[in-house]
């Protein structure tokens, strides 16, 4: 076996979040682990890498489900990849990997991007990968991939499904795929051939139409030539008239040009006068501007001198204000210096006094502390004495109080016991008198029995009333149900009738509107006046086609004229004049149309037709007298409209019928509704009557129940009262005796308590001792409080002195700093005061100087104003003279403008005439080309001549338009269609050749498959018989091809006879026998075409221990004989023991599978290396 599966690498596939590698080594490799740990995921990864495309076979809903989905502690992955390594594959892989010794085939899937295959790192198609594994007798669905379900599927499979095993054994699985691909290509080629035939038929039909269009195009071209000549004549007249208009415009323009020259000369003289007057103005304007500038300068100088004077006065005031403020600040600083000196003196005196007190304070504080300690000891001794006296007095008082309470309680118990004994005696006497007499009990029981009998009778009456009501209601309900059913049926029939009427009306209205929209009132087609029998619409439409859309009105552009009949040769066929009713204008046309009998051949009759005759069939085929023929099926608009008109008549009749049916259904529905209402009313009446009877019976039953309840309650009450009275009497007697005994005991206890109270000590003496101890304690507490207060006062005074000394130091430092600051400020203020006084002396002379300068500036301003007035007056006088000259110049300019406008209009006329000439020339160039040979225009170029030429051109144009749309490329398209037919015939021949080759290839594949399948069947049968005997320890079995003589179509049937049983098919064996038989067949296939790898997924589950041993022995033999590498998934301990190595699949982390491997041969060497060497 040349190819070997070496290893499987899994990354991100299902529960294998981390990359894991499974080494596929020679021999038996076991995969074990608990349920749910991911063993099957290893096998599915192998199948997925080999091309599995069905997500359901991977236990998912879509293929992206194979990607690791994440757990509580792990994020999901976006891709999964499985890589399978094959060794010694030279010559097995498709190009360009044909010579590769090793192949690394990987499949990767990414969320949202699908999966891809790579072979040695290069992209590959899924089909190529699947074909590669199929040629190796492997693959995702190969028989080598055996699971417990696969064994069951093989057992339950039909014989034709089991044939896949033989195909794998023969190595034709890939051959089958190639044959299927060839069949697909053959089918596609046959479809192409069919399409080519269809296309050829379409082009041939189109070619006939194109030839007709070519004839129409010839007529169109002739009309176009006549139109071109008429248009040339019209354009020649228009060009001559445009030339005359252009010459007249040029003469008018020359006259206007002369007038413009004269007006220009007059305007030049006026402009010179205005220019001279304007030339004198600049000098005067300059003088006026200079005087105005001098005036402004004088005014600004006067304003500036006033501002200088005001600033000088303001600066003097500010200097005096600063001097006053400095004087006040100097006085304040002087007071601060004096206050600081006085404060320092006062604080120094207080500090001296406090230091003296600090020296004498410790001795006084110590003496006060000793006095406070002595007073505290005396107070504690007094408190102890007072506590002892209080406790003794409290004990004596408590004993006396307890004795008094005991005496009072004993006395109270004695009196209470006596009172209770008297009450118990009175209660006993009362209960004995209230016992229930036996006569009352007997009377109550008799009343209860009578009431019970009346209740039973009333209940029977109610039951009878309820039964009668139920029967009456059932009868009424049946009647109502019948009425409702009849009403529902009537409503259904009415709704159906109305729906049918509405449907017919809707179709009638829609068809009426459709027919009304196709033609206007003024051009109603003649086909609307024709009555055609059903079935002949297509025939008449095919015969006359668009001519039926012409009008019967002779004033219309397209119309039918009434002409007499022609003498025609007699043809033994019916004419449409005898079959169709129409206007007289159609009589001649209808007499020329003959109807072909059903089943007859029109080609045979076409030669007998005379000129003008047309032979038509009911399907719309046409045979015309001149050889023109149209096949059936080409529906025309006229035929469709005729069918619509016939359908409209049918709908008119159906509408009347459906309306009558709807009216009858509505009447039936109304009657059913009345019957239903009557049934409901009768049901309600019956229900009310029976309800009244039932109510009376229930009322009687309720009265009887109330009587019975009262009698029963009275009897029960009396019995209970008698029972309670007896119980109360017995209880009262017991209570009376018990209370008498308790009263005697209470009197004895009272006497004993009185004796104990007489022996208690005197409590008054103890109280006097307590008062004396409390007085001594009060004195001791007062003395201790006074001593403590004296001590605390001295200590507080000492602390206050300490704090005051610290405060004095701070205050003295602060006053020293303020004194220094005040002295420094006093020095600074003195200097600033001197500076301010000197500034005042300097500023006092500035206001007088500024006032003198302001007076000089005002005088200069007055002189400047006088000079400006003179220059301004001179400028105004010169301006008036210049304005007068300018008005005269403008008048002359206006006259010149009017002359120029007149010239411009004439120039526009020339332009318009030139444009008209150019338009005519452009149209000539556009319509007739460059330098056309135009006809000579008439001698008289008048509008009538132009209109006459125009009418001739328009008439010819209308005639061309009446021809209708014309395909001017029809000749070219005829040639193209003929060439296309030749091309299609050539391609059809090529396709026919390809189909023959494909069929030959498929035949070769079938022959090869049959030969290989027939050759391998006997070999598989021989191996199967041997393996069956080995697996069962005897017995017989064989294979047979059933269902067809063709091996490629036959099914595979299995016949087995285990030891001690009869020969039977596989389905009749037990579960274990079926599993062993199926495995024998699978291994027989291995013998014929060994696969590089085989996966056995829990196939040993249905086997007992003895059969598992045989199964494992057979696996070992298969490894030696075929070299197949087995991956065995198992839970059976015997199978695990026979493996060469084990892979354990664990899930230490929830949802994450991991692999652990154990190689048994290496493990044995580690346990006993000497034994291993001996074995070697």
Image (cartoon, helix red, strand yellow):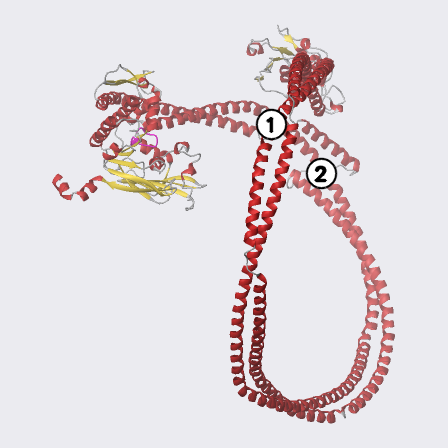
The Cα–Cα distance between marks 1 and 2, rounded to whole angstroms, is 150 Å
Element type where label 2 sits in the image: helix
Q: Which residues are magenta?
A: 135-143
Q: Are marks 1 and 2 in contact (CB under 8 Å)?
A: no
Kindly identify which residue carries mark 2.
235
Residue 85 visible in the current orientation:
no
Q: Residues within 10 Å of mark 1 (few under 14, many from 20)?
A: some
Q: Is residue 1141 above or below residue 625?
A: below
Prevalent SS, magenta region? loop
Q: Quadrant of residue 1161?
A: top left
Residue 945 on the magenta span: no
* Disc 2: CA contacts within 10 A as few (<14), some (14-19) or many (>=20): many
**Secondary-structure class at tag 1:** helix
Residue 140 magenta-highlighted: yes
Q: Nearer the viewer, residue 886 or 60?
A: 60
Number of marks drawn: 2
Seen from the viewer's position, the closer of residues 106 and 765 is 765
Badge number at residue 726:
1
Q: Position of residue 71 (x, y in %)?
A: 42, 43
Q: Residue 690 versus residue 367: which sits nearer the camera?
A: 367
Q: State whether residue 1138 is above or below residue 750.
A: above
Q: Is residue 156 left or right of residue 705?
A: left
Q: Quadrant of the N terminus?
A: top left
Asked if 229 appears above or below 1018 in the picture, the reply is below
Q: Position of residue 745 (x, y in %)?
A: 55, 42
Residue 79, position as x, y percentages in the image = 41, 43
Q: Could you tell me residue 101's position as x and y percent?
A: 26, 40
Q: Foreground mark, 1 or 2?
A: 1
């Amino acid at each position: 076996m040349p190819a070997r599966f070496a290893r499987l690498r899994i990354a991100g596939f299902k529960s294998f979040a981390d990359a894991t590698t499974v080494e596929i080594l020679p021999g038996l490799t076991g995969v074990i682990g608990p349920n749910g740990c991911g063993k099957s995921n290893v096998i599915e990864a192998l199948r997925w890498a080999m091309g599995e495309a069905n997500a359901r076979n991977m236990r998912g809903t879509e293929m992206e489900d194979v990607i690791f989905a994440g757990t509580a502690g792990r994020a999901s992955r976006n891709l999964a990849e499985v890589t399978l390594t094959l060794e010694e594959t030279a010559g097995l892989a498709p190009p360009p990997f044909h010579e590769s010794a090793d192949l690394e085939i990987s499949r990767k899937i990414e969320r949202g991007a699908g999966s891809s295959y790579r072979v040695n790192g290069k992209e590959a198609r899924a089909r190529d990968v699947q074909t590669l594994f199929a040629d190796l007798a492997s693959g995702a669905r190969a028989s080598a991939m055996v699971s417990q379900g696969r064994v069951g599927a093989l057992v339950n499979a039909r014989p034709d499904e089991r044939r896949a095993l033989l195909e794998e054994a023969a190595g034709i699985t890939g051959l089958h795929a190639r044959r299927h691909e060839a069949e697909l290509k053959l089918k596609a080629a046959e479809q192409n051939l069919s399409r080519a035939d269809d296309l050829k038929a379409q082009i041939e039909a189109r070619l006939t139409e194109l030839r007709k269009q070519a004839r129409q195009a010839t007529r169109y071209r002739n009309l176009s030539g006549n139109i071109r000549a008429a248009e040339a004549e019209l354009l020649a007249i228009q060009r001559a008239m445009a030339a005359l208009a252009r010459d007249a415009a040029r003469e008018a323009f020359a006259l206007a040009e002369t007038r413009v020259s004269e007006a220009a000369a007059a305007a030049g003289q006026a402009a010179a006068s205005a220019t001279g007057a304007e030339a004198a103005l600049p000098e005067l304007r300059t003088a006026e501007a200079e005087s105005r500038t001098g005036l402004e300068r004088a005014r600004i100088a006067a304003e500036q001198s006033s501002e200088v004077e005001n600033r000088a006065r303001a600066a003097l005031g500010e200097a005096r204000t600063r001097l006053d403020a400095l004087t006040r600040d100097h006085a304040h600083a002087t007071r601060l210096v004096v206050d600081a000196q006085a404060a320092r003196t006062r604080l120094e005196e207080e500090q001296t006094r406090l230091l003296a007190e600090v020296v004498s304070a410790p001795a006084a504080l110590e003496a006060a502390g000793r006095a406070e300690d002595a007073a505290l000891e005396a107070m504690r001794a007094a408190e102890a004495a007072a506590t002892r006296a209080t406790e003794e007095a409290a004990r004596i008082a408590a004993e006396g109080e307890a004795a008094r309470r005991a005496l009072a309680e004993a006395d109270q118990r004695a009196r209470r016991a006596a009172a209770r004994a008297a009450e118990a005696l009175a209660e006993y006497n009362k209960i004995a008198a209230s016992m229930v007499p036996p006569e009352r009990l007997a009377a109550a029981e008799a009343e209860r029995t009578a009431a019970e009998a009346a209740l039973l009778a009333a209940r029977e009456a109610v039951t009878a009333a309820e039964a009668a009501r139920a029967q009456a209601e059932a009868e009424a309900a049946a009647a109502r149900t019948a009425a409702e059913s009849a009403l529902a049926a009537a409503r259904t029939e009415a709704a159906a009738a109305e729906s049918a009427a509405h449907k017919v009306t809707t179709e009638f209205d829609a068809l009426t509107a459709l027919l009304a929209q196709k033609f206007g009132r003024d051009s109603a087609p003649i086909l609307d006046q024709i009555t055609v029998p059903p079935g002949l619409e297509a025939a008449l439409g095919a015969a006359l086609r668009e001519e039926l859309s012409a009008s019967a009105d002779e004033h219309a552009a397209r119309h039918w004229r009434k002409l007499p009949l022609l003498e025609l040769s007699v043809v033994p066929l019916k004419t449409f004049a005898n079959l169709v009713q129409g206007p007289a204008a159609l009589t001649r046309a209808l007499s020329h149309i003959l109807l072909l009998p059903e089943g007859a051949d029109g080609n045979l009759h076409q030669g007998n037709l005379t000129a003008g005759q047309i032979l038509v069939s009911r399907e719309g085929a046409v045979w015309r007298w001149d050889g023109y023929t149209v096949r059936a099926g080409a529906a025309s608009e006229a035929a469709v409209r005729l069918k619509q008109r016939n359908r409209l008549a049918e709908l008119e009749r159906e509408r009347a019928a459906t309306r009558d049916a709807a009216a009858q259904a509505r009447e039936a529905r109304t009657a059913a509704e009345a019957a239903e209402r009557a049934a409901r009313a009768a049901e309600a009446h019956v229900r009310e009557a029976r309800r009244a009877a039932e109510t009376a019976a229930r009322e009687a039953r309720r009265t009887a129940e109330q009587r019975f309840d009262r009698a029963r309650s009275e009897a029960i009450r009396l019995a209970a009262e008698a029972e309670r009275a007896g119980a109360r009497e017995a209880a009262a007697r017991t209570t009376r005796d018990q209370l008498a005994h308790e009263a005697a005991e209470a009197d004895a206890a009272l006497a004993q308590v009185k004796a104990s109270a007489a022996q208690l000590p005197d409590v008054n003496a103890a109280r006097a001792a307590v008062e004396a101890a409390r007085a001594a304690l009060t004195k001791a507490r007062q003395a201790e409080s006074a001593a403590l207060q004296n001590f605390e006062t001295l200590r507080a005074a000492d602390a206050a002195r300490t704090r005051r000394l610290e405060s004095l130091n701070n205050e003295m430092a602060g006053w020293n700093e303020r004194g220094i600051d005040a002295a420094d400020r006093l020095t600074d203020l003195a200097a600033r005061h001197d500076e301010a006084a000197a500034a005042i002396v300097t500023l006092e002379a500035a206001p007088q100087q500024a006032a003198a300068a302001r007076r000089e500036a005002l005088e200069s301003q007055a002189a400047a104003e006088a000079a400006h007035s003179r220059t301004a007056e001179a400028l105004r006088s010169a301006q008036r003279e210049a304005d007068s000259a300018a008005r005269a110049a403008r008048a002359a300019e206006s006259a010149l403008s009017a002359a120029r406008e007149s010239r411009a209009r004439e120039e526009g006329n020339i332009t318009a005439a030139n444009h008209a000439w150019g338009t005519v020339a452009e149209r000539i160039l556009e319509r007739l080309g460059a330098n056309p040979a135009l006809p000579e225009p008439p001698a008289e170029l008048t509008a009538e001549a132009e209109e006459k030429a125009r009418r001739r051109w328009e008439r010819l144009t209308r005639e061309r338009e009446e021809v209708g749309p014309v395909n001017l490329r029809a000749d070219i398209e005829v040639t193209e269609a003929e060439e296309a037919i030749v091309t299609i015939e050539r391609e059809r021949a090529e396709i026919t050749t390809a189909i023959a080759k494909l069929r030959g290839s498929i035949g070769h594949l079938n022959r090869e498959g049959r030969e290989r399948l027939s050759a391998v069947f006997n070999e598989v049968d021989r191996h199967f018989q041997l393996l069956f005997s080995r697996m069962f320890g005897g017995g017989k079995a064989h294979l047979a091809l059933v269902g067809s003589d063709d091996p490629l179509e036959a099914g595979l049937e299995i016949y087995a006879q285990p030891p001690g049983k009869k020969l039977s098919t596989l389905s009749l064996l037990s579960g274990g026998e079926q599993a062993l038989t199926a495995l024998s067949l699978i291994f027989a296939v291995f013998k014929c075409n060994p696969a590089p790898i085989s996966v056995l997924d829990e196939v040993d589950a249905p086997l007992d221990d003895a059969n598992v041993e045989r199964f494992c022995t057979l696996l070992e033999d298969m490894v030696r004989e075929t070299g197949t590498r087995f991956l065995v998934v198992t839970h059976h301990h015997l199978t695990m023991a026979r493996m060469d190595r084990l892979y354990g699949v664990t899930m230490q982390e929830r949802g994450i599978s991991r692999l652990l491997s154990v190689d048994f041969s290496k493990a044995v060497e580690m346990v006993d290396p000497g034994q291993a060497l001996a074995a070697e």
